[in-house]
Image (cartoon, rainbow, N blue to C red):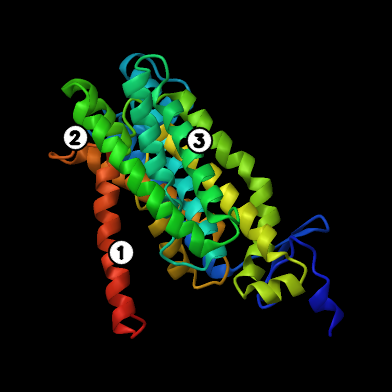
Amino acid sequence: MNRTLVEPALGAPAPTRRGPVVRLGRTVALPVHPRSVLWCLLLLLIVLGVAVATLSLGRLGIPLPRLPVVVSGGGEGTEAFVFGRLRGPRLTVALGTGAALGLSGALFQSVTRNPLGSPDVIGLGAGAGAGAACAALLMPGIVPAPVGALLGATLAMVVVASVTGTGLRHPGRLIVAGIGVAAMAQAFTHFVVSVMARDQASVLSAYINGSLGARDWGHAAIIWGAVLLSVPLLMFLAGPIAVNEMGDELSDALGASAGRTRTLAIGLSVVLSAAAVAVAGPIAFVALTAPQIARRLSRAPGPNLVLSAITGALVLAAADLAVQRSPIGDGLPVGLFTMALGGVYLGYLLIREWRKGVL
C-alpha cells in the first residue's frame, strides 16, 4: 500500500480532499475550499448587516453615524446605556450562542453520519430545561436557572452515556437513549411549570424555550470563552472527522481511530451545546439547521466547521432581530421563532429527500 495513505497524522485531512492546505505544525493540516471561503466572507458581511440593524433600529436605536464611536467605547448617556446594557450584550450572546450551536451540530452530524442529528436529539436540551425547572422549584433564589440548566444537561448526558453501555461511541444507541431521557425530562419540566405560581412559571417558561433577553457581558464572556477554548481541539479533530465520514474501517486503517474521534467530537459537541444552554436556555433547531445550510452552500465534504459556526451565528442573530422588531414577537423567547423556522426547514428536507426517492 502506498506509504502516503497509511501514515497521515491524526490531524491530517482526508486523502480524498484536494486544493490548498493550511498547515499548522506537523500534526494539523486544514484543507481550504475556495467556495467555502467565499461563502464565509459573504455570510460575515450579512452578519455585520444584522448586527448594525440590531443596534440601530427602533426607538432606542443608535444612529448609524454614531455607531462606530459608541461601539469603540466613546458613547455617553442613552447611547452608552443602550449599547452597554441592552443591545450590545444581547447581540454578542446571540452571535456566540449561534456559533456554538452551529459547531455543536456540525460535529454531531459528521461523526454520527446522521444529517438530522443534533445534541437536542440525545436529550441535552430537555435535560437542561429539567435542570432549570428543578432549580426554580426546589431552590428558588439559591441556584440560578442557568446553573441548574448546566447541571441538568450534564446529568442527562451522563445518563444517556451510561444507558448505552458503550459511552458515546455508538450513535444509534445514543439517539434511542436520548429520546427516552428527553421524554422523561420534558415530562418533569411540564410538571414543574404547571405547579409553580403564574409569575414564576412565565419566567421559567421563557428560559426553557430559549431566550436572549436580559443578558449581560458576563453571559457573553461565558459563551465566547467556550467557543474560543474549543478552537484548538476543533483544529486537531478536523482531519480525523473528515476521514471518519468515509467509514470506521477506513478511518482505523488510516490511523484516525474512529471510536476515539467519535467520542472526542461528541463530547466537544455536548460541551459547546451545554455552554449555549447555560447562557440562553435550550434554543431548538439551530444546531440541526446551521450545518445543513453550510454543507449545501459549500458543497464540500467534511464537517464545514467554520461555515457552520458563521451560519449558526447568522441564523440566531437574525431570528433575535426578527423577534425584537416584530409587532407580535416583542418579549417572546427567540427559541419559539427558531423552532418554527426549524420545523419549516425540516419539512423542506423531508420533501426533498422524498422527491429524490430516498424516503
For the residues bearing labels 2 and 3, Cβ distance under 8 angstroms: no
Going from the N terminus, do you reach mark 2 or mark 1 first? Answer: 2
Residue at image location 43% in from the left, 52% down from the top: 178
Q: CA distance from mark 2 to mark 1?
A: 25 Å
Is residue 253 among the parts visible in the rendering? yes
Total marks drawn?
Answer: 3
Residue at numbered disc 3: 223
Disc 1 marks a residue whose amino acid type is Leu
- Amino acid type assigned to the residue bearing label 2 in the image: Asp
Residue that label 1 marks: 346
Left or right: 22 with respect to 231?
right
Dot 2 or dot 3, earlier in sequence: 3
Q: Which residue occupies 30% across, 56% down? A: 342
Of residues 151 and 342, which is closer to you in this image?
151
Residue where numbered disc 2 is placed: 330
Q: Secondary structure at mark 2?
A: loop
The numbered mark at residue 102 is none
Residue 67 position within the rendered picture, expressed as x and y whole percent measured from the top left: 38, 31
Q: Is residue 220 left or right of residue 317?
A: right
Q: Nearer the viewer, mark 2 or mark 1?
A: 1
